[in-house]
């Protein structure tokens, strides 16, 4: 099946759906869009925005409950914004769980290759898992970007696994950036057997802040990976804590190679908080 689209969304997903063997071309807004979907499979799909298409695959979740999305053997090129975008907003006062895997896929995007953003408030709890396996990502912004925010009384847990994958181009290879404003965030990023290169600022960047009694715990494990020609830093860490906020960052490196890069950069700022 081949679909052409101009200006709108080419395909809108429903829950418990499977999309296979489809080609989508043209100046679409979103090639594939899903809102509050669960148990979705996207396999052997080709998306070509031709330099005018907006986002490739967009998933927007703002309801409680659990959701699973699988993207495999898929090619995304010629999109001006994000290749795969996931926006999770939980203000339900309940629990939300989201799991997504991207495997054996090729993604080229003008902004983020894979973008995950989670916002949790109103005494809600959110857990997110994203796995990226055996894929190739080229992006103008970040290859994989993970962001999170919580307010008082809410919690957010994000776990990201990236293994045998290549990431190139853009500002960052992998970017993790979050703010705990009174709530609690736990982020874990595991990178194994990954090649990151040709970025302008850093191969991997971990940025975090906590305020108003919030707590942020960020950890990264980097093993068996190569970072080369990644701009200013191989790995950049930045943490800021104020008004009784607490930030905890840990990093574990094993059997990695760094060439053509500035190495490790760290910046910590403490204003009435703890780091």
Image (cartoon, rainbow, N blue to C red):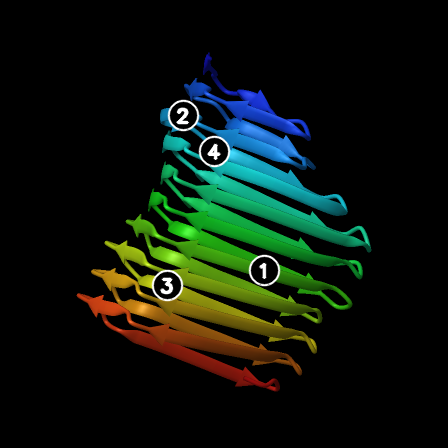
Name the mark nearer the viewer: 2 or 3: 2
> Would residue 139 be visible to someone looking at this image?
no
Q: Which residue is at the front of the view, 163 or 178?
A: 163
Q: Residues within 10 Å of mark 2 (few under 14, many from 20)?
A: many
- Of callouts 2 and 4, the N-terminal one: 2
Residue drawn at point x = 63 percent, y = 62 percent: 157
Name the mark nearer the viewer: 4 or 3: 3
What secondary structure is marked by label 3?
strand
Label 2–label 4 contact, CB within 8 A = no
- Of callouts 1 and 3, the N-terminal one: 1
Name the mark nearer the viewer: 2 or 4: 2
Q: Which residue is at the front of the view, 96 or 132?
A: 132
Q: Which residue is mark 2?
A: 46
Q: Is residue 18 left or right of residue 167?
A: right
Name the mark nearer the viewer: 1 or 4: 1
Q: Is residue 244 left or right of residue 233?
A: right
- The C terminus: image quadrant: bottom right
* Residue found farthest to the left: 260
């Amino acid at each position: 099946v081949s679909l052409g689209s101009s200006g709108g969304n080419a395909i809108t997903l429903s829950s418990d759906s499977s999309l296979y063997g489809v080609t989508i071309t043209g100046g679409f807004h979103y090639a594939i869009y899903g809102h509050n979907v669960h148990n979705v499979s996207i396999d052997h799909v080709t998306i070509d925005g031709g330099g005018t298409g907006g986002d490739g695959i967009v998933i927007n979740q703002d309801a409680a409950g659990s959701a699973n999305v699988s993207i495999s053997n898929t090619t995304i090129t010629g999109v001006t914004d994000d290749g795969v975008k996931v926006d999770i907003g939980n203000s339900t006062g309940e629990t939300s769980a989201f799991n997504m895997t991207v495997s054996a896929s090729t993604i080229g995007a003008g902004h983020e290759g894979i973008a995950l953003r989670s916002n949790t408030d109103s005494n809600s709890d959110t857990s997110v898992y994203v796995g990226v396996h055996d894929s190739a990502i080229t992006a103008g912004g970040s290859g994989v970007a993970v962001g999170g925010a919580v307010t008082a009384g809410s919690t957010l847990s994000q776990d990201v696994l990236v293994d045998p994958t290549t990431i190139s181009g853009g500002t960052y290879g992998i970017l993790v950036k979050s703010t705990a404003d009174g709530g609690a965030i736990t982020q874990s990023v595991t990178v194994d057997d990954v090649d990151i290169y040709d970025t302008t600022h850093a191969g991997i960047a971990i940025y975090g802040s906590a305020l108003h009694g919030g707590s942020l715990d960020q950890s990264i494990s980097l093993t068996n990976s190569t970072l080369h020609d990644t701009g200013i830093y191989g790995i950049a860490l930045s943490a800021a804590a104020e008004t009784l906020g607490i930030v905890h960052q840990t990093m574990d490196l094993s059997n990695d190679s760094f060439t053509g890069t500035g190495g490790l950069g760290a910046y910590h700022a403490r204003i009435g908080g703890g780091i």
